[in-house]
Image (cartoon, helix red, strand yellow):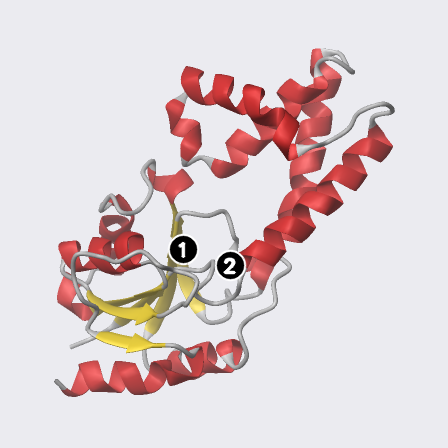
Amino acid sequence: MIRVIAFDLDDTLWYVGPVIKRAESILADWLEKEVPGYSYEPSTLMPIRETLLSEDPSLGHRLTAFRQQLIKASLVSYLDEQSAASHAEGAMEIFLAARNEVEFFEGALDTLRDIARSFQLGAITNGNADIYRLGLNDCFSFAFSAEQVGAPKPAPDLFHAALAHTGCEPAQMVYVGDDPIKDVDAANEVGLHTIWMKSNDKLIKGESNPDETIDDIRALPDAIRKLVDR
């Protein structure tokens, strides 16, 4: 019996590319107003990124911590260390606020609220979108990120965390995601049911097949009913 429907977030419920681009622009404007002479250019930060990752590879999945450390490191040439740390903290709040201003796919919110009447919903994500900032906490009862559990998908840790939290068996959970490897293959490996949110932008292929495939989030309730009726 299926009890829980879990979701990837970015590119499953909204397109993330435009969101990050806008958040980067807002972040750059804020920093450049706050710190005279400073220019926030992601491309010029590459050497700092590489240094931080070589010193602490875990930052690769600790996205919020990584960005904050990157900003702080880029500011030390303009500010003392304490001021750089303070500005980096403020910058992250600016970025996260913008990062969580998304344009949901058409019908996504109504679909989620419809499904939430029958199933427990939650998020399992490698990113740092926040269900509370997004206003999804009215229908999502849990959320786990790679930063929280210490490992990104396709590692199984996120799925195990969600299973432990909900107290259900793998066969009682459905995972909905857009990535054939990080979402479909990874969830299949743990034993979850999978629904692939097909995207023409994803050219990669996984090693396993989803239980159901949709190309519009509004088709999700029917896909779930098919799994329940099997």
> Residue 214 in the image: x percent, y percent?
34, 78
Q: Relative to 23, does residue 64 appear above or below in the rendering?
A: above
- Tell me where residue 115 appears, x and y as whole percent: 38, 80
Q: Secondary structure at mark 1?
A: strand
Q: What residue lies at 52% left-to-right and 52% top-to-bottom?
A: 129
**Image point 31% across, 87% down: which residue?**
222
Identify which residue, 183 or 199, lies in the foreground: 199
Of the numbered discs in the image, which one, if any, rests on residue 143?
1
Given the image, on which type of amino acid does mark 2 rest? Ile
Figure check: 73 above or below 27? above
Above or below, 30 relative to 106: above
First-in-chain label (2 vs 1) = 2
What residue did someone put label 2 on?
Answer: 131
Taking the image as shown, residue 174 lies to the left or right of residue 72, namely: left
Looking at the figure, which quarter contains the C terminus?
bottom left
Q: At x 24% / y 76%, what residue is drawn?
A: 212
- Quick one: SS at disc 2? helix
Q: Residue at x 28, y 82 (%)?
A: 223
